[in-house]
Amino acid sequence: MSEKIKPDWAGGDLLSRLVNILIQTKPIYNVMKHQARQVLMKTAEKNGIPWRKTYQELEASGVKERLEQITNQSLTYPNYYQVPFHAYDQGNLCWSAAFEAESATYSMGLRVWRNQPLTWQKAQSRLRGSFHHVLAEYCTQPVQDILDMGCSVGISTRTLHEYYQSHQDTPVRTVGLDLSPYMLAVAQLRDTKGEIEWIHAKAEETGLSDASFDLVTLQFVIHELPRQATQAIFQEILRLLRPGGYLAMVDNNPKSPVIQNLPPVLFTLMKSTEPWSDDYYTLDVEGLMQRVGFEYIVTVASDPRHRTIIGRKPEEG
């Protein structure tokens, strides 16, 4: 039997078209959205993740006072970012999304190893460690300056910074960049040591200097993008990297049996909160990287649900 390259519920397949019709029917979509949120919350709290408690603590933390300071007032949000997703009508541009992002992220680790007796802390550590392990194996040039694009509330950024800082003697400069100032306000609050620079900017047009990073990561980001945005972001990353620098991505693996065999209710709920799923699951990411100008290095099934893809900016000359 030949290997399937994507799930049947993505792209133009009959099942995918039927699911899309359901999602586009507003009363049904509203029910799906509510159900998706309830499933996430109940799964999290059942496994010890304090979803509602964390929300309440952040609400009372004074983090909202950081919003004006961290917001780039000249930024114009792209159209694809102003649609409902993750069960929020305002997408990531609201406090609810920012206050629940940590809990949702910790839940993600549990879903990867659903049938193993792991705490959410151990599952999250394994999730991040699986990505870092691939970086260690294939990104063999020195890494001093790191950019984590689409950093959300900074969990990916902090763990990446800690990983590299613990594996070398010289200081590491790490930047977290995101389109949501709400997410960045929480990221800044959680960065209690003040070790990371947090930037509110478009990944397609960061305003950062040419050739200023050795490693740029996109961690669980491009499944939330239309393909034209992914291409524009790849082009910007190529500009930002020094010759020999790396682009590293970890995201859902279309070839994963776990992804392909999701129960109908789960994949329908998931698709209802991810408006660009079809674009992602039908995109040749490795081919697009190479067309933009990267040297393709490797794709690794880094855990049962996700893949890590690494490319490299060619050396000059």
Image (cartoon, rainbow, N blue to C red):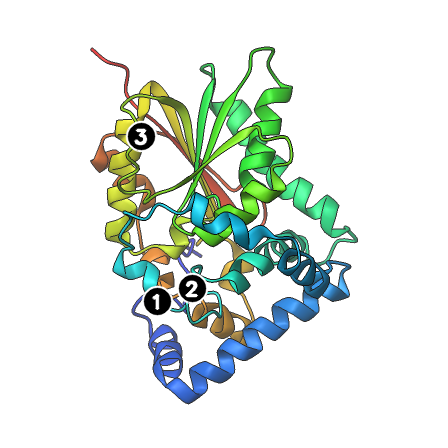
Q: Nearer the viewer, residue 296 or 155?
A: 155
Residue drawn at point x = 46 percent, y = 82 percent: 30
Residue drawn at point x = 53 percent, y = 51 percent: 65
Q: Give the percent coordinates (x, y) of residue 36.
A: 55, 73
Q: Amino acid at mark 1?
A: Val
Disc 2 is placed on an element classified as loop
Q: Is residue 61 above or below residue 196?
A: below
Q: Is residue 207 above or below residue 64?
A: above
Query: Contact, CB < 8 Å: mark 2 with mark 1?
Result: yes
Closer to the camera: disc 1 or disc 3? 3
Q: Nearer the viewer, residue 169 or 47?
A: 169
Disc 1 is placed on an element classified as loop
Q: Amino acid at mark 3?
A: Leu
Q: Is residue 48 above or below residue 173?
A: below
User: Label 1, on which residue?
Assistant: 83
Q: Is residue 186 left or right of residue 19?
A: right
User: Label 3, on which residue?
Assistant: 208
User: Label 2, on which residue?
Assistant: 91
Q: Amino acid at mark 2?
A: Gly
